[in-house]
Each structure stands twice: as C-alpha cells, then as structure tokens.
C-alpha cells in the first residue's frame, strides 16, 4: 500500500463475522458536524444495529510519525525513549465528555488518512458492549478496528478475541443492545449507581449484582482466556492468578 495524501477519500476493507465489506470516508463531505458519523452510518448498515445505540469506535494510530505535529511530548507516551502507538476514541455525534489530547483528536484527514488507515488496508471489526452513563444512559455498543496483519486466523491475541467474535455471540450482543424493555429496567437501577461512582462511591459490587440478576454481566466484559485476574496474597506473599474462562466455568 502506497501513501496517497492527495486523495479526497480513504477506502478500506473491514472483515466482520468472516465477510469483507468496503468502507469509504469522504473527507470533503460536509453533511455531518462530526465526520466520524460516516463511519457510524456504515457500521449501522453492516451490523444491523441502529446508530442510536452506538457509543464510540476506536482506531489504532499505527503510524504516528506521519502526523504533522509528531513528536509532541504532550500527546505521545514514551517507553525507554520510544514513542508508543496509541488508541484514538471517536464518539457518536458528540465531542468526548472529558477531552484528553492523549486519546482524543478531531476526525479529520490529517489525523486519520495514512496515520490510522491507509488506502486498501484491511481490518478486523471488533465490538464490545458497556453501560454509557454520560450520553446514552443505557447499554450501548462500541467498535474498534484491528489491522488484519495483527490477527492470526483462529488464534486469540490481546487485540482480538476469536471466541467472542462469532455470529452466535454477536446475536446475543445485538439482542441485548436493541432490547428497549430490558435496557429500561437495567438503566433504572444502574444509572444512579454509575452517577455515584463519579464521586468515588464504591458501587461496583452493586452494579455487578444488577448485571448478574439480568444475566448480562458475562456480555459486559472481556472474557477471553488470555485475560486473567491477578492479585497479591499478603499472607502468603505470592501472586495469585485466576483464568477468567476457568472462573466462569467453575461458577457454572
């Protein structure tokens, strides 16, 4: 793929549940206040989930050196003197609530074209669900694009779980997100707890109890076997590691 900074469009392919789909960003399209809405509309057509239930999508800044303001120590993290790649977050039809230049930027050509997405590049489409207490005030779905060269067929990595990106799993996600009655019941109980947590009130246990009661907690986290719980046992002086997948099997 060659860099083409003179193009008015960025075209790329997205693999979703085993099938490739073409996506296009038209940088001259002034129809939207936020140009990322082009992506949200195409994701609605691709996934069948209405745009009103979408929270955000995430892009990897794979080639930060192509940004005009690179390197900027206020933006890019450094580990052992090296600039690390970062994820950028773009919200559905709004600015982020707490704008942070380390994670947020304007969805404009100079920030995205070639820096995050090159013409003809291929991506895997990932998805996740979470409770959005700031905007939707209900459970919504978010997306992220993973460069295909980072994904090995049939193998889970830290950037893409194969087990949670199947047609059957996505159907469960879709049924949860689009169920208005269920979300109304959950929001009635969860929204006050979420608002309390903004003021350092520890409501996480209560939140989990609500999600377990409605049998949705397992859909609201990353349960890939690569992710583990780890904590220090002070009495024994050792670290204890529990595999999440094994933990869920033990709980039935």
Image (cartoon, rainbow, N blue to C red):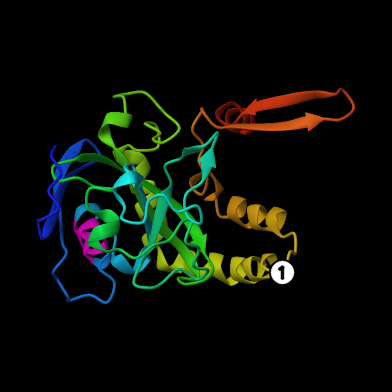
The total of numbered circles placed on residues is: 1
Up/down of 111 relative to 84, above or below:
below
- For disc 1, the marked residue is 199
Residue 215 rendering spot, x and y as whole percentages: 54, 49
Q: Is the magenta region chiefly helix, strand or loop?
A: helix
Q: Residue at x 85, y 24 (%)?
A: 237
Q: As displayed, is residue 18 above or below residue 153?
A: below
**Image side of residue 210 versus residue 221, left or right:** right
Front-most of 53 and 41? 41
Q: Is residue 43 magenta?
A: yes
Q: Answer whether residue 40 is magenta in the image.
A: yes
The answer to whether one can see residue 55 in this image is no
Asked which quadrant contains residue 30, the reply is bottom left
Residue closer to the observer: 237 or 193: 237
Label 1: few (<14), some (14–19) or many (≥20) C-alpha neighbours in 10 Å: few
Q: Residue at x 68, y 26 (%)?
A: 241
Image side of residue 221 versus residue 240, left or right: left
* Residue 153 in picture, x, y percent from top left: 29, 24
In front here: 11 or 78?
78
Q: Which residues are magenta?
A: 38-45
Res 150 visible: yes
């Amino acid at each position: 793929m060659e860099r083409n900074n003179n193009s008015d469009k960025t075209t790329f392919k997205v693999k979703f549940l085993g099938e490739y789909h073409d996506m296009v960003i038209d940088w001259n399209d002034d129809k939207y206040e936020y140009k990322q809405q082009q992506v949200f509309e195409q994701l609605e057509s691709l996934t069948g989930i209405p745009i009103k239930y979408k929270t955000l999508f995430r892009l990897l800044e794979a080639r930060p050196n192509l940004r005009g303001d690179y390197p900027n120590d206020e933006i890019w993290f450094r580990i052992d003197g090296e600039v690390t790649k970062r994820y950028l977050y773009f919200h559905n039809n709004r600015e982020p609530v707490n704008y942070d230049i380390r994670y947020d930027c304007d969805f404009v050509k100079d920030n995205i074209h070639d820096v995050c997405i090159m013409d003809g590049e291929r991506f895997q489409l990932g998805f996740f669900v979470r409770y959005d207490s700031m905007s939707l005030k209900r459970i919504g779905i978010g997306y992220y694009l993973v460069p295909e060269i980072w994904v090995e067929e049939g193998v889970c990595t830290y950037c893409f779980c194969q087990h949670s990106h199947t047609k059957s799993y996505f159907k469960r996600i879709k049924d949860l997100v689009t169920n208005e009655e269920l979300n109304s019941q959950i929001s009635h109980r969860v929204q006050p707890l979420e608002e309390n947590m903004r003021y350092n009130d520890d409501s996480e246990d209560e939140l989990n109890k609500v999600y377990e009661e409605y049998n949705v907690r397992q859909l609201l986290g990353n349960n890939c076997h690569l992710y583990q719980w780890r904590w220090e046992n002070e009495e024994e002086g050792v670290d204890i590691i529990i595999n999440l997948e094994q933990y869920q099997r033990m709980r039935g």
